[in-house]
Every structure is written in C-alpha cells, then in structure tokens.
C-alpha cells in the first residue's frame, strides 16, 4: 500500500510563520517529532489524527526553530579570526599535554562534518572540528582537540593513543558527555534511517 503524500501547509508559531510537511505513519501511535528538511520542517505524526494534534505539531515545530536560533547564536567564527583562536588554543593544549609536539599546520571549524566531532590529516597535519561542537563546554571542545592532536602522534586508536588522550584529565568525562549528545540526536529522529554516529577520526583529507 502506497504511503500517503505529505501534507504541505503553513502554520503560525511563536517564532513566526513556518512551512511544514506532515508525514503520517502507521508505525507511530502517539508521538510526534519534527526535523528540518530544506525550507520546510518535516513533522512525523501518527496516521490517526487526534484532537490535540495541532497543538503538539506547533510545539515540536517551535522546538526545531528554537534549536536553530540557538545554534545561530552560538555559531563559531568560521573565518581567519576563528582559526587563529583555535590555533592559540591548540598551542596551549600542546604545551600542557604534549610538550615538543609540532603544532598542526592548521586547525579550523567546518560545517560539512556532521558525522564526526573532529578529524585529523596525518600527512597534511591539519585538524578540522565540527561546528556542532560550538556552544558545548570548553573542556569538551578541548578534549576533542587533544584527541586530534594525539592522532598526529599515533594514527590508530591503540592503547598508546588512549594513553596520550588521557593526559587530558577530563577525557573520559568528555567522551561520556558527547555520547549523551549523540544519543539525544538519535532520539530526536526516530523514523530516520540510521547514520554514522558523530565521532572523531583520523585519516587523510
């Protein structure tokens, strides 16, 4: 049986008018969730309508809009000034945890790295950090930087690598924090296809 077409319309929220697409599923019996898809907010709803549905739809759409507004407010500086600040931060962490290590050739925020918190190119000695980290506690961001700096010394996730990472005393705490963030990301989109978890990795860019 073919799925019903999305219901396209516009609703008024506390943050203004928003175009939405309501996609109904027989797999859902009670919950309603939403996520951004292009210029619309996709609402995933049960096939059977309920009396309180409109209020619930407005509420989940507003949550998406609030998350987007908060993300804009805390977006990192993606230009030279932001990269310069990251370079200073990396040099501080090298001095504290990896004395003598040559600083990376570059370290920058990127917006096209949605499935990894950070990445390091061993050959080019460059580090890239996902902009999703912006707004997280500084000690969490520092732990990701340390993780990628450790990859410049040890490419694999070997025992030696983790020993290097744990020179930063809050490494395990930061890993638990990021695991919680990843879990929340998956819970917000229960009907979406599984994707790679955000993670840190090394390799050649």
Image (cartoon, rainbow, N blue to C red):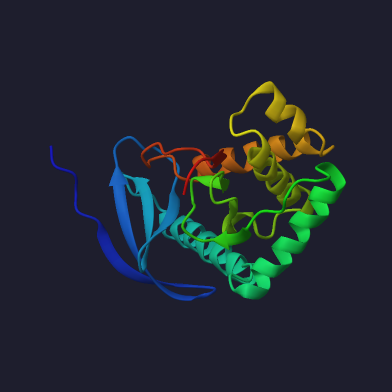
Residue name at image x 70 percent, y 40 percent: 177
Q: Within the image, what quadrant is residue 138 found in?
A: bottom right
- Spot the residue most to the top: 159
Residue 40, given in percent of the width and then of the height, sits at 36, 66
Specify the farthest residue to the left.
1
Which residue extends farthest bottom? 16
Image coordinates of residue 10 in percent, x first then y, are 35, 71
Q: Position of residue 205 (x, y in %)?
A: 46, 49
Q: How many numbered tags mark residues here?
A: 0
- Front position in the image: 195 or 5: 195
Residue 171 horizontal side relative to residue 181, left or right: right
Residue 90 location, quadrant:
bottom right
Is 50 positioned to the left or the right of 13 in the image?
left
Query: Quarter holding the N terminus?
Result: top left
- Residue 176, given in percent of the width and then of the height, sits at 70, 35
Identify the residue at horizontal 66%, vertical 54% (top origin): 104
Q: Is residue 76 above or below residue 27?
A: below
Image side of residue 6 versus residue 108, left or right: left
Q: Does residue 150 lie above or below 61 as drawn? A: above
């Amino acid at each position: 049986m073919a799925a019903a077409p999305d219901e396209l319309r516009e609703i008024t929220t506390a943050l203004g008018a928003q175009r939405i697409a309501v996609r109904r599923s027989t797999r859902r019996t009670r919950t309603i969730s939403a996520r951004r898809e292009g210029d619309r907010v996709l609402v995933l709803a049960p096939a059977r309508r309920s009396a309180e549905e409109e209020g619930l739809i407005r509420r989940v759409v507003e949550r998406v809009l609030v998350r987007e507004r908060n993300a804009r407010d805390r977006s990192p500086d993606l230009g030279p000034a932001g990269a310069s600040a990251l370079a200073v931060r990396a040099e501080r962490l090298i001095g504290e945890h990896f004395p003598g290590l040559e600083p990376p050739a570059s370290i920058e925020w990127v917006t096209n790295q949605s499935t990894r918190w950070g990445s390091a190119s061993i050959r080019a000695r460059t580090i890239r950090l996902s902009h999703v980290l912006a707004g997280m506690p500084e000690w969490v961001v520092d732990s990701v930087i340390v993780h990628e700096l450790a990859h410049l010394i040890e490419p694999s996730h070997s025992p030696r690598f983790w020993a290097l990472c744990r020179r930063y005393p809050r490494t395990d705490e930061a890993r638990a924090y990021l695991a919680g963030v990843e879990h929340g990301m998956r819970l917000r989109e229960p009907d979406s296809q599984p994707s790679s978890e955000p993670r840190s990795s090394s390799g050649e860019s």
